[in-house]
């Protein structure tokens, strides 16, 4: 197959101090209660980002079947994971904020507040007119709950999964070579330079910044595209602040958002395209890498400021461990989305917490 396909943002990695505790929080507060995989193998391929050594870890991929990307909850188990040296600010280089979709922003705010979630702003509209608010997870990472339109299943929950993130960069125009020209975020929703009311409540949010919100002009198709849905990336460049690298002096997998991952088809095509654009793969797994009960081919590139972007060509996803039934994506038409009944059936992997 020659054509390169992006099915959507598969997940955003988030480093925590306790994987089980984090899973419970993301499941009960944000609805990400479907466990796709639970992997405790030693991380070897990412050694260059972990002090040059393999590291013991536990990684869980959890999803909200209302639609959107999942959370790869990542916990260093062989060492004490480090928190950021200083508080992460708007415009710091890396992924500073993950974005969670809401179908009813007032209901989401009221429910989360009543459940003791650490809300750090009121509801306020952004430059695109969509309303949202900010919160912190138990480890200090900031999430932006925002009105969004792309849904997979019915109206049982006010929240869905992730639909994007905010990425701090040193030069937006240079970063667009990757995010627009390689990843297909070719439509500009807004491009504004100012101070912004919707950022004022978060660290660094009162500084003057340039913000560019990107989406894809063509809908994603094939594979898990219906479940993952539409997505956005927001690039932020500080004008008056003093940005730092979020993971300066720390390892991949430490506390915070560690990568954004795209579900793709044709890994060879992407390795060639990324190299041609000046973003060669820094890490590439073997073609049939086991991730717990899932299987695939994955690799990482760096954006111009060192933020890690992952590509995963998913081969097999477990649908039911009990019946030993998996979805083999390599035997399907790559442009044909999985039927909704099949993606809804992932609910058999839902975990209920007391």
Image (spheres, rainbow, N blue to C red):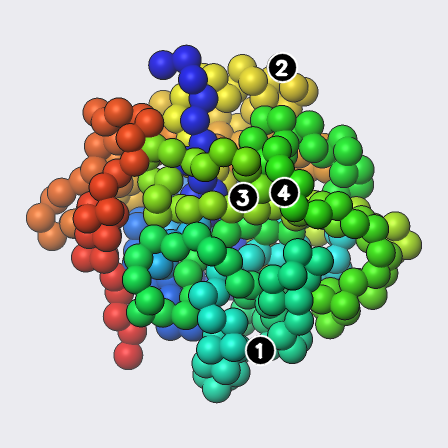
Asked if the residue at tag 1 contacts the one at tag 4, i.e. Cβ–Cβ closer than 8 Å, the answer is no
First along the sequence among labels 3 and 2: 3
First along the sequence among labels 4 and 3: 4
Left/right placement of residue 161 relative to residue 249 reads left
Rendered residue at 26%/25% (across/down): 333
First along the sequence among labels 4 and 2: 4
Question: Could you tell me which quadrant the N terminus lies in?
Answer: top left
First along the sequence among labels 2 and 1: 1
Mark 2 secondary-structure assignment? helix
Say which of marks 4 and 1 sits in front.
4
Say which of marks 4 and 3 sits in front.
4
Mark 4 secondary-structure assignment? strand
Left/right placement of residue 346 relative to residue 197 reads left
Left/right placement of residue 61 relative to residue 345 reads right
At label 2, counting other C-alpha atoms closer than 10 Å, the crowd grade (few under 14, some 14-19, many 20 or more) is few
Q: Which mark is residue 237?
A: none
Question: Could you tell me which quadrant the C terminus lies in?
Answer: bottom left
Q: Which residue is mark 4?
A: 214
Q: Which mark is residue 276?
A: 2
Q: Is 68 drawn above or below residue 221 in the view shown? A: below
Gap between marks 4 and 1, in whole Å?
28 Å
Q: How many marks?
A: 4
Give the x, y percent position of residue 77: 46, 55
Give the x, y percent position of residue 235: 70, 45
Gap between marks 2 and 1, in whole Å?
44 Å
Q: Which mark is residue 118?
A: 1
Q: Which residue is mark 3?
A: 260
User: Which quadrant of the figure has residue 200?
Assistant: bottom right
């Amino acid at each position: 197959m020659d054509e390169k396909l992006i099915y959507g943002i598969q997940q955003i990695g988030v480093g925590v101090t306790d994987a089980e505790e984090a899973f419970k929080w993301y499941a009960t507060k944000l609805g990400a209660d479907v466990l796709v995989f639970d992997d405790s193998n030693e991380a070897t391929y990412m050694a260059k980002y972990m002090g040059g050594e393999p590291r013991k870890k536990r990684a869980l991929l959890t999803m909200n079947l209302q639609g959107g990307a999942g959370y790869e909850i990542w916990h260093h188990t062989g060492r004490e994971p480090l928190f950021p040296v200083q508080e992460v600010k708007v415009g710091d280089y890396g992924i500073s904020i993950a974005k969670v979709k809401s179908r009813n922003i007032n209901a989401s705010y009221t429910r989360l507040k009543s459940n003791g979630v650490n809300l750090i702003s009121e509801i306020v509209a952004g430059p695109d007119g969509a309303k949202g608010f900010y919160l912190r997870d138990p480890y200090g990472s900031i999430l932006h709950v925002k009105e969004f339109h792309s849904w997979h299943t019915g109206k049982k929950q006010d929240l869905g999964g992730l639909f994007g993130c905010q990425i701090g960069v040193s030069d937006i125009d240079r970063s667009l070579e990757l995010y627009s020209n390689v990843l297909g975020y070719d439509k500009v929703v807004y491009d504004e330079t100012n101070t912004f009311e919707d950022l004022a409540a978060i660290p660094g949010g009162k500084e003057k910044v340039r913000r560019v919100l990107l989406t894809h002009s063509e809908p994603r198709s094939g594979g898990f595209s219906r479940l993952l849905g539409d997505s956005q990336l927001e690039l932020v460049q500080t004008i008056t602040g003093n940005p730092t690298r979020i993971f300066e002096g720390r390892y991949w997998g430490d506390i915070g958002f560690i990568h954004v991952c795209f579900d793709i088809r044709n890994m060879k095509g992407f390795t060639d395209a990324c190299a041609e654009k000046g973003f060669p793969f820094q890490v590439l797994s073997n073609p049939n890498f086991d991730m717990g009960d899932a299987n695939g081919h994955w690799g990482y590139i760096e954006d111009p400021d060192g933020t890690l972007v992952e590509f995963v060509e998913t081969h097999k996803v477990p649908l039911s461990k009990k019946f030993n039934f998996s979805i083999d994506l390599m035997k399907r038409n790559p442009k044909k989305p999985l039927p909704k009944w099949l993606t809804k059936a992932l609910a058999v992997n839902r975990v209920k917490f007391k």
